[in-house]
Image: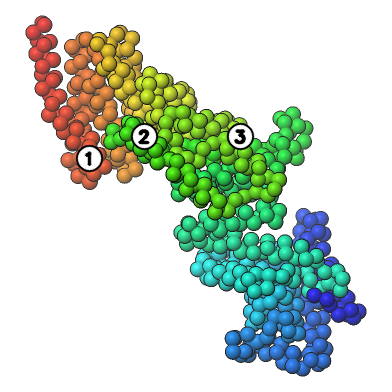
């Protein structure tokens, strides 16, 4: 927009330039005891501009009475045209209003930056009032969108989410309509106060306008998330990230973390192709932040130390998202392939393999219609990283193993930052994910001995941490580890039992190993149950809801394990069966006293009732044998 070349106008433009420089450059040098010095000086200049504009507008109005009438009608809030607008955006009155609105917008930002939020909001409202009664044209469309973006922040702070949604959706529709009907680079806020020949380039105008719209999409993503419209929120997050890359307006680590976070939404929706793309892009873009400084360099410089800390943390966080991707992909495959007893269904496996080719073709079509990340210099790197891990559900051991190995490599990367020393909770969560990866890989393994070794690796991962962790400070985590270790030993016991069943007569080593696994599983189940007791050692009469099923399942499995122990000694057999009967009886009695518990352990309760009836007969037979021997 070419401005008049009068001395007064040149002064206004110079003041605006100086105000911008004070706000954006000089303010960074302000002393700690007067942090807003430059901002306050800029504010005074903006107020002077406001006064000058009113004087200039009066003079222009005298030269153009008709336009002045439009301007006064608009500012005074009188009814406009039939369509509700007082003037067109590119009319003299519309341009005057836009100039005033730009100054009000800048004053609004100035007050926000100096932590005077109420005054800042009022200036933004004044800005919007000035341009809202004009038709939207290339002269005001950018200002229209940016003012709404800023006001939405206040609405979100007051939890006025639906009002914010309305504001943003109007801004979005205005952008789409403008691009459809005009599409030319609109005026930027800076263009209102530059002399002829000093306007921004067309390319820069486009970039600034598109980034304003990108902010609109970003805020809409947050609004839809708060309204629990997760599908729309995910779409807008994806579009925001894609546009940030396209217009090169992003901080690599921040962008990467946002992309990795978005992958978790796609994982929850089982859209693994999109999740993988987000994670590959996150890893590639994060690498643009530079190499991780060495420990030696970090010791020499505070700046290098901070950089090392940040890069390690963010890349480890992205690695954790990759772990979740691999784990969920394998777990979802397991759900499809397992039979009613949790074993691999070979018929189902063959059926899914036959159907895979058609599925791959459909997925490729879907990929072509998806929004892809990356520019010419990063797209190849993203695609290359995607090719290292499948987005298809694994259907056999080799496919599962390839995904497992990728997940395991990211476990090592995540542990670089989230070490036990300083990050206890995060480190243990990573170990638990590693254990879960091994557990689901074992599902695909048909050899029972090799499957047992995979579960042994899980024990080796978790057992040292469980022993060292202080239950006083990490009670919930200790319970999780105790229960998982108990379950893992329990699964190994079942596997050893299956191996023994194939032998005519189990050897001494097999029996010894079997009993050790039974004892280990019972030990950890008992540790879990003991953690529920009061400081006086009393077991609660009524279990809390979140502990109800785990506690009763633990009791049930202890009962089963006690009855499974192998011994040639009749006295030992009798003792084990009596302990088993006590545990089964506890479950039955608890459910009788607390009927609401029956639904939580229907299967276990049914079997417990059977065992309470059958075990006394077995106990009596052993007693009879012992009596006859004596």
Q: Estimate the x, y position of residue 262 in percent, counting from the top left.
A: 54, 49
In the rendering, at what x and y percent does residue 507 appear? Answer: 29, 8
Distance Cα–Cα, label 3 vs label 1: 44 Å
Residue 219 visible within the image: yes
Q: Which residue is mark 2?
A: 350
Residue 417: mark in rendering: 3
**Observer-nearest of 418 and 339:** 339
Q: Earlier in the sequence, mark 2 or mark 1?
A: 2
Marks 2 and 3, the one that precedes in the sequence: 2
In the picture shown, does residue 246 fall above or below 302? below
Q: Residue at x 86, y 74 (%)?
A: 196
Work out which quarter of the rendered image holds the N terminus and state it.
Answer: bottom right
Q: Nearer the viewer, residue 566 or 525?
A: 566
Asked if residue 102 is positioned above or below residue 291 in the image, the reply reads: below
Q: For mark 1, what is the residue?
A: 602
The span from disc 2 to disc 3 (Cα, nearest Å) is 42 Å
Q: Nearer the viewer, mark 2 or mark 3?
A: 2
Q: Nearer the viewer, mark 2 or mark 1?
A: 2
Query: Which quadrant of the structure image shows residue 356?
Result: top left
Kind of element beneath mark 2: helix
Secondary structure category for the residue under label 1: helix
Return the disc, 3 or 1, that comes first in the chain's sequence: 3
Viewer-closest of 132 and 353: 353
Q: Residues within 10 Å of mark 2 (few under 14, many from 20)?
A: some
Relative horizontal placement of residue 435, taking residue 283 as reference (left or right)? left
- Asked if the residue under mark 3 is in contact with the one under mark 2, i.e. CB atoms within 8 Å, the reply is no
Q: Is residue 65 above or below residue 425?
A: below
């Amino acid at each position: 927009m070419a401005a008049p070349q009068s001395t007064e106008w040149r002064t206004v433009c110079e003041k605006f330039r100086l105000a911008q420089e004070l706000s954006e450059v000089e303010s960074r040098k302000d002393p700690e005891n007067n942090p807003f010095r430059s901002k306050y000086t800029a504010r005074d200049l903006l107020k002077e501009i406001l006064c000058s504009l009113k004087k200039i507008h009066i003079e222009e109005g005298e030269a153009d009475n008709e336009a002045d009438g439009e301007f006064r009608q608009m500012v005074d809030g009188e009814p406009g045209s039939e369509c509700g607008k007082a003037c067109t955006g590119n009319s003299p009155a519309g341009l005057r209003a836009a100039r005033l609105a730009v100054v009000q917008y800048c004053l609004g930002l100035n007050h926000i930056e100096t932590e005077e939020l109420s005054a800042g909001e009022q200036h933004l409202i004044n800005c919007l009032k000035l341009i809202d009664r004009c038709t939207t044209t290339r002269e005001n469309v950018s200002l229209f969108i940016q003012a709404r973006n800023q006001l939405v922040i206040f609405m979100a702070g007051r939890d006025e989410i639906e009002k914010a949604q309305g504001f943003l959706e109007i801004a979005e529709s205005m952008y789409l309509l403008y691009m459809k009907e005009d599409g030319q680079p609109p005026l930027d806020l800076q263009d209102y106060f530059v002399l002829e020949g000093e306007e921004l380039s067309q390319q820069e105008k486009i970039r600034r306008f598109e980034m304003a719209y990108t902010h609109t999409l970003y805020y809409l993503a947050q609004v839809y998330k708060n309204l629990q419209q997760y599908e729309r929120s995910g779409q807008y997050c994806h579009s925001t990230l894609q546009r940030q890359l396209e217009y090169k307006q992003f901080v690599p680590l921040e962008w990467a973390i946002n992309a990795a976070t978005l992958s978790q939404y796609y994982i929850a929706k089982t859209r693994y192709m999109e999740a993988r793309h987000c994670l590959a892009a996150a890893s590639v873009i994060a690498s643009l932040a530079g190499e991780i400084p060495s420990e030696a360099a970090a010791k020499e410089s505070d700046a290098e130390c901070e950089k090392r800390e940040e890069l390690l943390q963010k890349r480890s966080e992205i690695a954790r998202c990759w772990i979740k991707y691999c784990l969920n992909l394998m777990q979802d495959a397991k759900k499809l392939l397992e039979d009613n007893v949790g074993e691999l269904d070979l018929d189902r496996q063959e059926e899914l393999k036959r159907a895979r080719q058609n599925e791959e073709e459909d997925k490729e079509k879907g990929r072509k219609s998806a929004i892809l990340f990356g520019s010419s210099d990063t797209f190849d790197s993203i695609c290359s990283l995607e090719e290292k891990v499948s987005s298809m559900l694994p259907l056999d051991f080799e496919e599962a193993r390839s995904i497992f190995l990728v997940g395991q490599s990211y476990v090592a990367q995540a542990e670089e930052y989230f070490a036990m020393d300083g990050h206890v909770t995060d480190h243990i969560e990573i170990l638990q994910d590693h254990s879960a990866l091994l557990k689901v890989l074992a599902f695909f393994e048909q050899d029972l001995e090799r499957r047992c070794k995979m579960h042994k690796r899980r024990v080796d991962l978790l057992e040292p941490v469980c022993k060292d962790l202080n239950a006083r400070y990490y009670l919930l985590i200790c319970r999780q580890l105790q229960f998982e270790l108990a379950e893992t030993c329990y699964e190994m016991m079942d596997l050893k039992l299956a191996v023994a069943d194939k032998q005519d007569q189990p050897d001494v080593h097999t029996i010894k190993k079997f009993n050790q696994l039974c004892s280990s599983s019972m030990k950890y189940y008992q540790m879990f149950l003991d953690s529920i007791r009061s400081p006086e050692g009393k077991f609660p009469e009524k279990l809390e809801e979140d502990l109800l099923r785990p506690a009763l399942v633990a009791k049930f499995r202890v009962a089963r394990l006690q009855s499974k122990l192998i011994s040639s000694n009749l006295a030992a057999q009798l003792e084990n069966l009596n302990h088993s009967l006590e545990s089964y009886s506890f479950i039955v009695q608890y459910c009788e006293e607390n009927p609401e518990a029956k639904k939580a352990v229907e299967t276990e309760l049914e079997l417990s009732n059977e065992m309470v009836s059958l075990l006394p007969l077995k106990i009596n037979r052993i007693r009879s044998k012992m009596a006859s021997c004596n």
